[in-house]
Amino acid sequence: MSDASTPTIITDARGRKLTLRKMTVIDQTRMFRAIGADQSQNQPYVQIVECAYMVSDIDGLPVPAPVSERQIDAAISRLGDDGVAAVMVHRIAEIQATTSAAEAAAEANGEIVGRADPFAKPDGSPNTAPSSSA
């Protein structure tokens, strides 16, 4: 993960260099405004739009953030399947790294993280009640 001052550049399957912008809260609100209320409920669509919205240039050519449905369609079309896939893979890796860092910080603070069994003991062993015989 890079900080806001360092551009993130990834390469898609077609060999294009995609520069990604950091999505700030204001970027997200602008993206949702461009998507519209109805489409904002369509999670797969939102994920694809987010990929297109994150790309600030392709091979050095600037790509403005889309602000209308027509511009969203053009940005997705320009990015194509390979570009969307590359951005999605990057986003997944970014989310996994953030999750791992949050879990490590929580564990360092003595918090219990990622227990599959909500009834397990703090050490992770099963919490079994003593059996009663009749």
Image: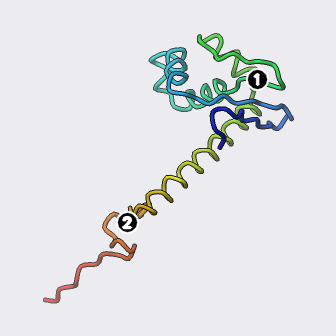
Percent position of residue 10, x then y: 76, 37
Write the residue at 63% across / 33% down: 4
Position of 118 with respect to 56 (left or right) is left
Position of 8 with respect to 50 (left or right) is right
Task: Give the mark, 1 or 2, whose residue is nearer the N terminus.
Answer: 1
Farthest-out residue, bottom: 133
Q: Residues within 10 Å of mark 1 (few under 14, many from 20)?
A: some
Position of 87 with respect to 32 (left or right) is right
Mark 1 vs mark 2: give the one in front.
1
Which residue is tagged 2?
117
Q: Secondary structure at mark 2?
A: loop
Position of 26 with respect to 127 (left or right) is right
Which residue is tagged 1?
57
Write the residue at 76% across / 18% down: 62
Farthest-out residue, left: 134
Percent position of residue 120, x then y: 34, 70
Write the residue at 73% across / 20% down: 77
Percent position of residue 66, x then y: 63, 15
Farthest-out residue, front: 5
Image vertical order of residue 49 relative to residue 87, above or below? above
Q: CA distance from mark 1 to mark 2?
A: 45 Å
Identify residue type, mark 1. Answer: Asp
Write the residue at 38% across / 61% down: 111
